[in-house]
Image (cartoon, rainbow, N blue to C red):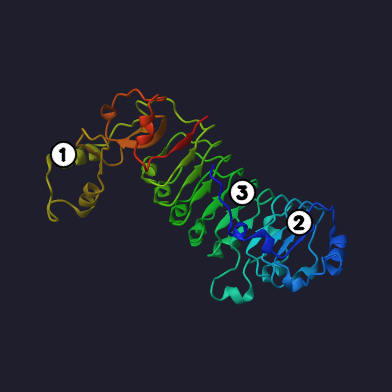
Amino acid sequence: MEVYTSDSSDTDSREQKTIDFGRMNLDLITLEDHLSSPHKALAKSKSDIETLLLNHNRLVGLPSILQQFTNLKILDLSSNALTQLPDAICQLPLVTLIAKNNLLTNSSLPKSFMTKQQTGNGGSTLKELNLSGNQLTHFPEQVTEMRQLKYLYVGGNKISSISKDIWKMQGLHVLSLGGNLINEVPETVGSLSQLQALVLCDNLIENLPMSIARLKNLKSLLLHKNRLRHLPKDIVALKNLTELSLRDNPLVVRFVQDMALKPPTLLELAGRMVKASGQRPGPYDIPRTLAEYLNSANCCVNPNCKGVFFDNRVEHIKFVDFCGKYRVPLLQYLCSSKCIEPEQTALRAPSSNNASASSGFMMRKVLLG
């Protein structure tokens, strides 16, 4: 997987004004003592500090003295025993807040991650929020108001669904939801136009929405350890996708000849005949409801078939060859089982280096093993 670094890592560490109290076995009382004692805080003014590292301690809460760090940009609270993030923490001008591997629940999060001044215009200084490895049971709705957030990590929780308001987070570059209990991905995910990495691995997902194909800037899509049997056919439109992880899914290994085809209704058969004949009934020739029905026809995806279908269709899995090395199962709809084309032999391990000359926008890695 490609490494996506947050904005905070771009700053020269030598120029950062940092206090590092990580891995010091501190509890709440000893931490407050350290922060209150100038000699222990390296004689720095609290207003000068931009980075405060409190990771890997024994903190169950945060001292009120944190509010005096008025220029704090980075706060690392990871790997403690925190059961509450106070609302006051959101009054700090934080760019990065890391609170992974704690005991946080949905009710213990701030009601809003924006300051009172920021609430008016919908802005926020926070660019990276990491709540992975906690005890969240549903997607934290308050983060959807953070339009400027670029990196959101909420993996390793017990989240069962993704908020339909996720579309509001137009600034997101990385959305990490791996290791949860998610069984459905909303269509609104496809509205995240700036998204570059989508991590959905180790969940209970059976289908992906067609809107995934609208993520034109997506580079990495991690789907391993789910319940996927096929992918949306339009996924091949993701020209920037370079990493697709599919291992440990019940993906089919052969073509499905006919998946529970039900006999077409008389209405369906009549509609197909009308469309096949090329007739175009006028507005006064047939009832309006029938005209609307005829306009809802879908074309069969088999290029050798000119047929259409309405409500009755054959679901078929077609394997698309990526770079001559991997075959990805995509779902397509046909008007009849007769339109299923014979499976062609896939080129799985070409010895020639010419394989690298395949279409430049195709995926360079498909991790199936």
Q: Do the residues labelled 2 and 3 touch (CB within 8 Å)?
A: no
Mark-to-mark CA distance, 2 and 3? 17 Å
The percent position of residue 252, horizontal first and vertical second, equals: 44, 28
Callout 1: few (<14), some (14-19), or many (20+) C-alpha neighbours within 10 Å? few
- Of badges 3 and 1, nearer the viewer stands 3
Mark-to-mark CA distance, 1 and 2? 65 Å
Q: Residue drawn 76% across and 56% down?
A: 83
- Residue under label 1: 276
State the residue in front, 83 or 89. 89
The percent position of residue 1, horizontal first and vertical second, equals: 54, 42
Q: Are marks 3 and 1 in contact (CB under 8 Å)?
A: no
Q: Residue drawn 39% across and 51% down?
A: 214
- Tell me the element at label 3: loop
State the residue in front, 280 or 153. 153
Work out whether mark 2 precedes mark 3 in sequence or the reverse, and give the earlier one.
2
Q: Residue drawn 26% across and 29% down?
A: 339
Residue 362 seen in the current view: yes
- Residue under label 2: 83
The percent position of residue 261, horizontal first and vertical second, equals: 34, 30
Q: Do the residues labelled 1 and 2 touch (CB within 8 Å)?
A: no
Residue type beneath disc 1: Ala
The percent position of residue 328, horizontal first and vertical second, equals: 41, 33
Residue type beneath disc 3: Ile
Work out whether mark 3 precedes mark 1 in sequence or the reverse, and give the earlier one.
3
The label number, if any, that marks residue 159 in the structure image: 3
Residue type beneath disc 2: Thr
The label number, if any, that marks residue 3 in the structure image: none
- Tell me the element at label 1: helix
